[in-house]
Amino acid sequence: MARRLTSLEVQRTERLTPHMIRVVAGGDELLGFPDTPYTDRYVKLIFPRPGVDYPEPFDMDAIRRDLPREQWPMTRTYTVRDFDPTARELTIDFVHHGDSGLAGPWAAAARPGDRLRLLGPGGAYAPRPDAGWHLLVGDEAALPAIGAALERIPAGVPALVVIEVADAAEHQELPSPGDARISWVHRDDTSPGPLLDTVRALEFPAGQLHAFVHGEAGAVKLLRRHLIDERGVPREWLSVSGYWRRGRDEDGFRADKAAERQAEEQAAATA
């Protein structure tokens, strides 16, 4: 089944912190946009390649059928920070590090009326209402999903939150009905361990936790091992995934993951 293509227009932008830009896009096509239950709801943003003429109406199936791969639009995966079906507005927060990258510079230059096309949504996680408490861990890439999840923590339920950012200027207000205790960790580029060290030092409350751990793949791998092997958290109570890998853009990261999956499948076939 083809993934849903939604075409929107930028309504407004806001710089939340020195390196985080909020883009609010809207349009009538949001009338049929699926309002899924997931707080890690994600979409794939479509960025046309300069100098390539694409069919109108924009049709990804036709593009992939009729154009060589090097002319296909580029895509980047982003979490939907908020979706308001009544106002027909969808909010996405972008990390911006100057001129590097693709989506961040686009967001910095975005103006009302600019076109934003996307595929989706997808998603798999939302805070379980039967959990005794919640653990939310990640970096800037996971911050929008963490913020959306915090808004869904039931009133009074404990939530321990650890977020890695560059410095104090990147802190945000993250409201929650739950009893949220947020620890901001400032990045140490010489080590992947600040998140792990902080989580290791936490005193976990009593009761069954539901954990959301997303961000840089190397740090996430260490955290997953800690939660399973050292804390004894059952895998079914974990949502753990690498959103990106240090030194790789999203295209490279996807290629890495595809190669890893292929190697795992070959190993399983020969076991």
Image (cartoon, grey):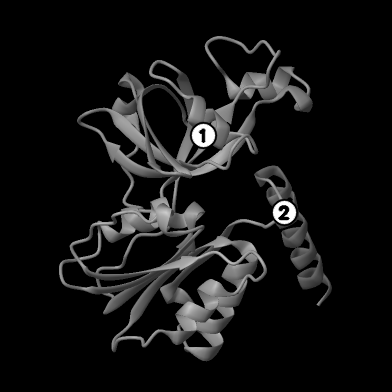
Mark 1 vs mark 2, foreground winner is 2
Amino acid, disc 1: Arg
User: Residue 267 is drawn in which quadrant?
Assistant: bottom right
In three-dimensional space, the C-alpha distance between marks 1 and 2, rounded to whole angstroms, equals 29 Å
Q: Secondary structure at mark 1?
A: loop
Asked if residue 148 lies left or right of residue 226, the reply is left
Q: Is 270 placed above or below 113 here?
A: below
Quadrant housing residue 159? bottom left
- Which of marks 2 and 1 precedes in the sequence? 1
Q: Residue at 35% across / 53% down in the picture?
A: 39
Q: Position of residue 71 (x, y in %)?
A: 74, 22
Please give the residue where the numbered disc 1 appears in the rendered image: 3
**Residue that numbered label 2 is attached to:** 247
* Image position, residue 61 (x, y; %): 62, 24
Q: Observer-nearest residue: 71 or 250?
A: 250
Q: Secondary structure at mark 2?
A: loop
Residue visible at 68% across and 46% down? 249
Taking depth in this image into account, of 26 and 258 the one nearest to the observer is: 26
Crowd rating for badge 1 (residues with CA inside 10 Å; few <14, some 14–19, many 20+): few
Q: Residue at x 47, y 31 (%)?
A: 4
Q: Give the residue type at disc 2.
A: Gly
Report crowding for label 2: few under 14, some 14 to 19, many 20 or more residues within 10 A (C-alpha). Answer: few
In this picture, residue 178 sits left or right of residue 3: left
